Amino acid sequence: MTDELALKRWKALEPGLRKKLESNVYCGKCGVTTIVDYEVEYSNSQFTLKGSCQKCHGSVARVVD
């Protein structure tokens, strides 16, 4: 479940930066892809996006320092 504070902090980032981070996620099957249908977590000064690969719909995650 997305933490409300995490989502608020994520949305405070510049939209272009968010888009760049969303579109640079590694999928074990597809390689570099875009994360979709993701949830946002925030702890220890970093974001973690957990969602699905846009290409194969497999599970992917992205940690953002």
Image (spheres, rainbow, N blue to C red):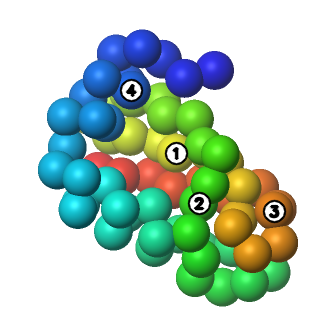
Position of 38 relative to 1 (above/below): below
N-terminal of the pair, mark 4 or mark 3, is 4
Is 15 or 39 nearer to us in this picture?
A: 15
- Cα separation between marks 2 and 3: 9 Å
Q: Would residue 28 be found to the left or right of residue 3 on screen?
A: right
Q: Residue at x 30, y 23 (%)?
A: 8
Q: How crowded is mark 1: few (under 14 residues within 10 Å), some or many (20 or more)?
A: many
Number of the label disc, if any, that sits on residue 49: 1
- Cα separation between marks 3 and 1: 15 Å
Mark 4 and mark 1 in contact? Answer it, CB < 8 Å: no
Question: Which marked residue is nearer to the observer: mark 3 or mark 1?
Answer: 3
User: Which residue, given by chain and number where applicable, does mark 3 sit on?
Assistant: 57
User: Which residue, given by chain and number where applicable, does mark 4 sit on?
Assistant: 7
Under circle 3, the secondary element is: loop
Q: Residue at x 51, y 56 (%)?
A: 62
**Label 2 sits on what residue type?**
Ile
**Label 3 sits on what residue type?**
His
Q: Residues within 10 Å of mark 3 (few under 14, many from 20)?
A: few
N-terminal of the pair, mark 4 or mark 1, is 4
N-terminal of the pair, mark 4 or mark 2, is 4
N-terminal of the pair, mark 2 or mark 3, is 2
N-terminal of the pair, mark 3 or mark 1, is 1
Position of 36 relative to 40 (above/below): below
Question: Which marked residue is nearer to the observer: mark 4 or mark 1?
Answer: 4
Mark 4 and mark 3 in contact? Answer it, CB < 8 Å: no
Is 13 or 44 nearer to us in this picture?
A: 13
User: Which residue, given by chain and number where applicable, does mark 2 sit on?
Assistant: 35
Q: How crowded is mark 2: few (under 14 residues within 10 Å), some or many (20 or more)?
A: many
